[in-house]
Amino acid sequence: FVNYGGGGYWWLNHSNWNGLTVADLVFPWFIFIMGTAMAIVFPRKLNKIVQQQYDNQIQLAVHNESPPTLSRMSLLNKVTSRGLKLFFIGLFIINEAFDLEFMRIPGVLQYFAISYVINSLMI
């Protein structure tokens, strides 16, 4: 929408070299919200993993059976699959002709996917 004239509204167009409009702030806002959501969700998931490991040790001592658990590896698999899905959705949206010679890789969703995976590994 923004790249195709912004519906005729001046504040939805990208600014010239020396200005700032709402359209120029959309990408940083999305990155900020993604980071905020990760900062809220990932500690909860990690605490849940620790609690499940503790509960499983108690249950294993009592009942000698272990239920399926959430682990760091399963969390890493979810992060990786979500990042790959986001990356490839971005590839298919940007590139209408699937010609490898003219394929454009860097795009907004690809940047989201890369930043999501890297920041998830840091948290």
Image (cartoon, rainbow, N blue to C red):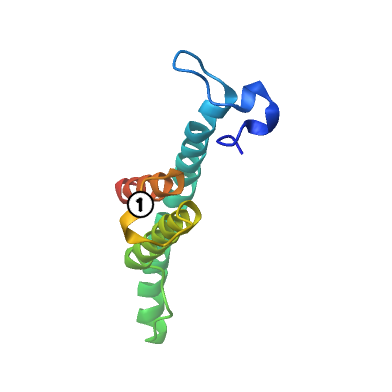
Q: Residue furthest right?
A: 8
Decide which of 113, 121 is in the foreground and name it: 113
Q: Quadrant of residue 115?
A: top left
**Above or below: residue 26 compared with residue 46:** above
Residue 84, percent across and down? Answer: 39, 60
Q: Quadrant of residue 86?
A: bottom left
Q: Secondary structure at mark 1?
A: helix
Residue 93, percent across and down? Answer: 50, 54
Residue 23, percent across and down? Answer: 56, 28
Label 1: how many residues lie within 10 Å, few (<14), some (14-19) or many (20+)? some
> What residue sits 61% from the left and 39% below the top?
1
**Above or below: residue 64 compared with residue 107:** below
**Above or below: residue 68 compared with residue 43:** below
Decide which of 50, 13 is in the foreground and name it: 13
Q: Quadrant of residue 35?
A: top left
| Residue pointed to by mark 1 | 117
> What residue sits 69% from the left and 28% below the top?
8
**Above or below: residue 70 compared with residue 64:** above
> What residue sits 39% from the left and 44% below the top?
111
Task: Give, as a three-letter code, the residue at label 1.
Answer: Val
Q: Is residue 26 left or right of residue 95?
A: right
